[in-house]
């Protein structure tokens, strides 16, 4: 009998240490919750940086962050649970979604729909972070140039975004945002790509190959630095100071998002942090272009035509090294090493801070 009780206690403790059930338990309804998808330790540290430096300037006594993920994702979220506990992070917690989710059911009511609705009804907004390539089958293409490493994450995030916004795949589906049109949704890099795919759009699977007919690193570099969205010198030269990314300028479209909402001066072309080889192609339902690459071939920003607080960018405004001097890197082997902060310059740093100021304003106004 004692052995049975001891075994039961061990099993309960083991289950408790591995499961995260924030929205299934009693929680403080007086607080406002912001969702962080793919809540890796790195992504939590990113949000902590922006909070501690007041770049993400919100009332931390009233707003709490809930990391939400699916149990089939490749990342070990026990690392995140331990990080939260070890650092006594009062404003961060986790919620695991465990129901089955398969490609044929992503864009319809499925076994995760109840979880999606519960999370939506008890939060004010959600962030979608960068990451690896989406399985092309999700947007009904054969895999030609994609490298897929975490399908569980992509199925979860694409289905979640479809539930939030709806899409061309299922015109009869009523999006959750119809019940709360002010809900905040944003994404960076993969986050923007997933938003586009989830609403019925498609992707360019490899920018150099499909847009410029360049497949080898030397060919790709001939495209010109301003048209590169990652650094291909690292595939040719061994140099530990070479950055794997590119810091290039973008241009705004005629859409009012950057001009009127973010209040950017007309004709301003800020320098941004770019790290991707894929991009939005056909736009999803309700999406409009807010920014392009300098040659106009790549969509760098989108916003929703119906829901004002739904917008995303292809670049990475969430990289801490843009905001203060950290490590030094270089793009070309002959360049002088500099910090990202120095390379983009004060005006572009200001652009990034204005972008986060708008996010802060939106989150602070929502209830």
Image: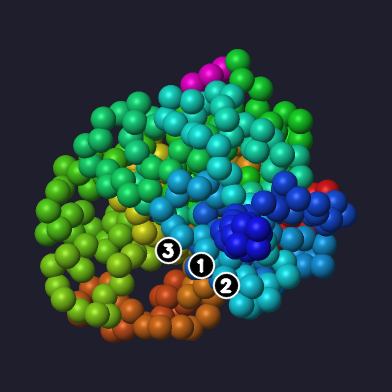
Q: CA distance from mark 2 to mark 3?
A: 27 Å
Residue under label 1: 79
Q: How is the image coloured?
A: rainbow
The x and y percentages for residue 114 are: 66, 33
- Asked if the magenta segment contains residue 362, the reply would be no
Q: Which residue is under mark 2?
A: 83
Measuring 27% from the left and 64% from the top, which residue is drawn there?
231
Please tell me how crowded label 1 is: few (under 14), some (14-19), or many (20+) other residues with Cα within 10 Å. Answer: few
Q: Position of residue 122 (x, y in %)?
A: 76, 45
Circles 1, 2 touching at the beta carbon (< 8 Å): yes
Quadrant containing the N terminus in the rendered view:
bottom right
The answer to whether residue 228 shows anywhere in this view is: yes
Magenta range is 167-171
Instruction: Give the labeled residue for mark 3.
Output: 273
**Residue 190 horizontal side relative to residue 364, left or right:** left
**Residue located 53% across and 80% down the image:** 324
Q: Secondary structure at mark 1?
A: helix
Give left or right: position of 307 versus 141. right
* Foreground of the two, 264 or 93: 93
Name the one closer to the observer, 48 or 242: 48
Mark nearer the N terminus (3 vs 1): 1
């Amino acid at each position: 009998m004692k052995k049975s009780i001891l075994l039961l206690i061990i099993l309960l403790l083991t289950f408790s240490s591995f499961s995260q059930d924030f929205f299934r338990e009693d929680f403080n309804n007086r607080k406002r919750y912001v969702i962080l998808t793919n809540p890796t330790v790195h992504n939590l540290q990113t949000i902590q940086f922006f909070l501690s430096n007041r770049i993400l300037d919100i009332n931390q006594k009233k707003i709490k962050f809930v990391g939400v993920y699916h149990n089939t994702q490749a990342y070990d979220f026990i690392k995140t649970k331990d990080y939260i506990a070890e650092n006594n992070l009062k404003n961060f917690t986790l919620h695991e979604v465990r129901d089955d989710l398969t490609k044929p059911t992503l864009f319809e009511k499925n076994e995760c729909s109840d979880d999606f609705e519960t999370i939506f009804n008890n939060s004010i907004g959600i962030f979608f972070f960068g990451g690896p390539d989406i399985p092309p089958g999700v947007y009904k293409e054969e895999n030609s140039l994609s490298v897929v490493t975490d399908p569980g994450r992509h199925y979860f995030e694409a289905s979640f975004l479809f539930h939030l916004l709806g899409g061309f795949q299922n015109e009869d589906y009523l999006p959750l945002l119809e019940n709360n049109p002010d809900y905040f949704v944003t994404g960076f890099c993969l986050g923007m790509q997933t938003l586009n795919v989830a609403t019925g759009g498609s992707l360019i699977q490899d920018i150099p190959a499909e847009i410029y007919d360049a497949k080898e690193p030397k060919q790709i570099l001939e495209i010109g630095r301003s048209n590169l969205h990652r650094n291909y010198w690292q595939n040719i030269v061994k140099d530990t100071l070479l950055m794997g990314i590119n810091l290039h300028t973008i241009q705004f479209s005629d859409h009012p998002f950057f001009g009127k909402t973010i209040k950017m001066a007309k004709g301003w072309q800020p320098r941004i942090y770019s790290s991707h080889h894929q991009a939005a192609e056909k736009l999803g339902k309700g999406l409009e272009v807010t920014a392009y690459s300098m040659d106009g071939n790549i969509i760098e920003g989108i916003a929703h035509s119906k829901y004002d607080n739904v917008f995303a960018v292809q670049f990475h405004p969430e990289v801490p090294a843009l905001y203060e001097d950290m490590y030094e890197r270089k793009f070309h082997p002959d360049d002088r090493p500099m910090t990202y902060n120095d390379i983009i310059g004060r005006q572009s740093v200001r652009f990034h801070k204005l972008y986060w100021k708008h996010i802060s304003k939106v989150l602070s106004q929502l209830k």
